[in-house]
Amino acid sequence: MAKNKILSGMRPTGRLHIGHLSVLENWKKLQEEYSCFFFSADWHALTTSFEETGEIKKNTLEMVADWLAVGLDPEKSVIFTQSDIMEHAELHLLFSMIIPLSWLERVPTYKDQVQQFREQGKDIMTYGFLGYPLLQAADILVYRADAVPVGEDQLPHLELCREVARRFNHMYGRSVFPEPRALLAKVSLLPGIDSRKMSKSYANDIGIFTGTDDLKKKVNSMITDPARIRKNDPGHPEVCVVHKYHSIYSPGELAGIEDQCRKGEIGCVACKRIIQSSLDRVLAPLREKRKEITSRPGFVEEVLADGASRARREAAETMRMVREAMRI
């Protein structure tokens, strides 16, 4: 019996930080149960970086090396670059002929992100940005994916994809596309070391492959309870960045650390030392795996070329069905 298919991707922003780790660990589990398609969304990167394209190819190679180091297996998953499969663009074009403009304008994140970028002095009022949820729908449906791993914030985009599938099937009287369901993933949301959203642009991130010495510097820079002045002052773990890291990487010690913190029995320096050790235990084997991957020249390129060949076969069959249904 054929496995159900899932599709997911990331925009290539270069090497990843530990905020991405729970997503990749979820992908690693899914590849054991599903026929998985994972891709570098380089065309999506153009929606906001259309003036700065020089790093996209390099970033794809860095990002995919990270995926492989964390445990994505090219024998179990199809790993490829979006722009290597022209069928994504063809299906997006055909969908753009039949989808009302109002469907795209009502996507909740659209106006918010336009305003956010405008405040940064960047105008992204382009068709590409307005249409990126439709390109996402084409990404998913060109493989006739049965499910998509998403966080709750991405549910409106997936619902648009389901509406696109329904409209196409109804309009042309063929059940070409399934309506993919959401695989709601429990993703651990880690703040940056300064308590803001973790982002390389804020320089508040911890890379998945950060070395021990740099990791120590990052952890020592973490924001702790601002009301705690002296080592023996009672602490408030709920406002402390270090505590949030303990909840994910030191769960067995969390209750004891919380209790000691509230009683003023453990200082912030000692608390940081514990989380640094916990993080290093998690990251050390990943660093070794990535070193092994990057010691093989051309390996990542080979993985992407093989993945593109496999993805192209699936996408080409979908487009044959689409053209037949549309009589074009």
Image: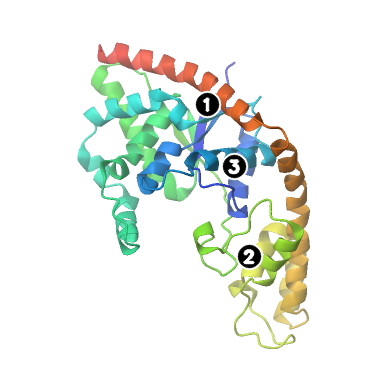
Calculate the distance from the C-alpha at mark 3 to the C-alpha at mark 2: 28 Å
Q: Nearer the viewer, mark 1 or mark 3?
A: 3
Calculate the distance from the C-alpha at mark 1 to the C-alpha at mark 3: 26 Å
From the image, tell me which residue sits under label 3. 62
Residue 70, how many percent across, how many down?
68, 41
Residue type, numbered disc 2: Lys
Calculate the distance from the C-alpha at mark 2 to the C-alpha at mark 1: 34 Å
The earlier-in-sequence mark between 1 and 3 is 1
Secondary structure under tag 3 reads helix
Residue 16, how many percent across, how many down?
59, 49
Can residue 310 be seen at all in this image of the molecule?
yes
From the image, tell me which residue sits under label 2. 244
Q: Nearer the viewer, mark 3 or mark 2?
A: 3
The structure residue drawn at horizontal position 66% and vertical position 66%, both measured from the top left corner, is 218
Q: Quadrant of residue 92?
A: top left
Q: Are marks 3 and 2 in contact (CB under 8 Å)?
A: no
Secondary structure under tag 2 reads helix
Q: Which mark is residue 290?
A: none
Q: Which mark is residue 5?
A: 1
The structure residue drawn at horizontal position 51% and vertical position 63%, both measured from the top left corner, is 202
> Relative to residue 98, is residue 148 drawn left or right?
right
